[in-house]
Image (spheres, rainbow, N blue to C red):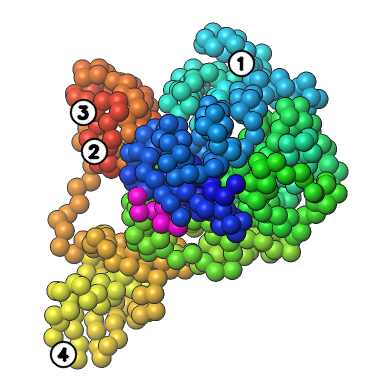
Amino acid sequence: MKSLLIANRGEIARRIMRTARRMGLRTVAVYSDTDRAALHVREADTAVRIGGSAPRESYLNIAAIIAAAKHTGAEAVHPGYGFLAENAEFAQAVIDAGLLWIGPPPAVIRQMADKAEAKRIARDAGVPVIPGYDGEEQDDASFHEAAGRIGYPLMIKAAYGGGGRGMRLVRDEGSLQPALDAARSEAEHAFGDGRLLLERALSGARHIEMQVFADQYGNTIHLGERDCSVQRRHQKLIEESPSPAVDDALRERMGAAAIALAKAVNYAGAGTVEFLLDADRNFYFMEMNTRLQVEHAVTEAITGFDLVEWQLRVAMGEHFTRQQSDIRLHGHAIEARLCAEDPAENFLPQAGRIVLWRPAEGVRTDHAVESGTEISPYYDSMIAKLIAHGATRDQARERLGHALDETVALGPSTNKSFLAAVLRDEDFASRGATTDFLSRFAFARAEPDATTLGIAATLLARNAEYGEWTSWSNNPARMMSVRLGEDDVALRCERGTYHARVRDEDIVTDSDARSVAAIESGAVHLARAGHSFSLENTTHAPPARRTSVATDGRLTAPMNGRVVAVNVTAGETVEAGKALVVLEAMKMEHALSVPQRARVQAVHVAPGAQVAPGHLLVELEPAT
């Protein structure tokens, strides 16, 4: 093998390229219209356009990717993770085209993609599984009957797919039907298959996964566990290895179970067997991911192995030279996923332009962004992942928190401050997390204080591109009023020193703040004290019009997204909380409702429409 096509984008494409180049391979990138100038495209030896911006037109377009491989003379295809990484049809198409598939056999992918079938295989292999329902009957009555036997709370899961899509926690019988409807819809849109299964929900459980590796000759080992319990919307945010809840004896038992499952299906390559660990240290099989994981970097940090290199060598038919006794875990590693989302608004995805990007030093940062990168609504919200390694868990945790503080990501809102707050939480620091950790974690968005506002106003005054303020006279003292959002700032400059009065405070502003700030589109984007702020210059703006569904009868889009469902028609009366429109953004569905009973006057969108923030979706009036 001399050339490798990476059928993916962003940070995982760049990460695979790093290893491929070190191994002397020529790299081929593929890209959508949105990604034509992306970093992974510019860094590859060759790049091929495969379609439009939507994933189905590009990164999910099997024929286009195979054609790109043939056109460029690529000999192998690495799928990365997400998109087609666990698609058996794609794996078979790669093999049928005479190309080398970097992954397990298509038959194994197919077996493990069906979660019900995977649970049956696990049971037969002696691996404990969570009690639940994985039957063929998919009608609502069968689910209600099964739920009554299982008991509440319970989990609904998509029978195919992953990434938190098609998953719902149901706490009581009254919540079951709407959760079934939502999970089925999300699964159909995400995976083209709306089949579901039920599992008993384990309270106080931890999400523990075992990294396994197997060559083509039956040699199988594990590389320890990762604790992935910090999750929102059933998607991981912080992962660490080793788990603070797993000792050597439990690691050996879970590792043996993971290896048994891998051997049962004649696995080859990199895989992850995922378990739930309950409060009594009983573990239960959930699913197997037949690909490299986002969080593979923490395993690399504590073992010293390059897992992508192992994938390539296994695919080329090499024998394992490592035995289980060779695997040693050194120190502790923690990874945080930096995402374009607003934690204070239920992790609402954010799209837009990264105005200023500067990754922190001292940790590994896998990313594919730079200043000026547009965060697209078409793809996952993760823009980078930071991995810290230390001799102890506390050392790794503190290094990662400091790195998050030092990372500059200005523009769309991110979860940077949220992640740092989790790492510094007393419970997380002392015991780690269970899967319900974030349901108890209180977080409030940092609001700009008077000093931050004074600095931002001074940056505007000093901005050479803002002609009005650069025309100040040369008088020893100059005055200027600035309005940022709803705050008035009175600026005075005396002999080159800026003074600000804001919120009844007098401040001498800090000129050093310019190194972590940018001015663009009428706003000051400022990184200060570990937080990021985007402060709109409203000096000459008319008074803001405050609207809401309750006051002006307009349901508008809160984000960029695609309309996947419209559940109302003009003239209909809807109850409070009913999902009127469902948007898909950054791989997740978001149901939009109204807080009070209302009558629909007009519907302005249809399924398939692409909308931007503020786009009018539905007009309403009070219900009589």
- CA distance separating discs 2 and 1: 39 Å
Label 4's element?
A: loop
> As shown in the figure, which amino acid type bears the numbered disc 1?
Ala
Which quarter of the picture shows residue 604?
Answer: top left
> As shown in the figure, which amino acid type bears the numbered disc 4?
Asn
Can you identify the residue that label 1 sits on? 147
Mark 4 or 2: in front is 2
> As shown in the figure, which amino acid type bears the numbered disc 2?
His
Which of disc 2 and disc 3 is earlier in sequence?
3
Which of disc 2 and disc 4 is earlier in sequence?
4
User: Is residue 34 depicted above or below 561 in this figure?
Assistant: below
Can you identify the residue that label 3 sits on? 604
Label 3's element?
A: loop
The one of 160 and 56 positioned closer to us in this rendering: 56
Which of disc 1 and disc 4 is earlier in sequence?
1
Specify the label residue 515 is tagged with. none
Mark 2 or 1: in front is 2
> As shown in the figure, which amino acid type bears the numbered disc 3?
His
Q: Is residue 194 left or right of residue 460?
A: right
Which quarter of the picture shows residue 472?
Answer: bottom left
Residue 40 forms part of the magenta stretch: yes
- CA distance separating discs 3 and 2: 9 Å
Label 1's element?
A: helix
Across and down, in percent, residue 292 comes to: 61, 43
Instruction: Write the residue at 15% across / 89% down.
Output: 474
Across and down, in percent, residue 452 comes to: 37, 69
Can you identify the residue that label 4 sits on? 475
Can you identify the residue that label 2 sits on? 615
**CB under 8 Å between discs 2 and 1:** no
Judged by its main secondary structure, the magenta piece is: helix
- CA distance separating discs 4 and 1: 78 Å
Region rendered in magenta? 36-43
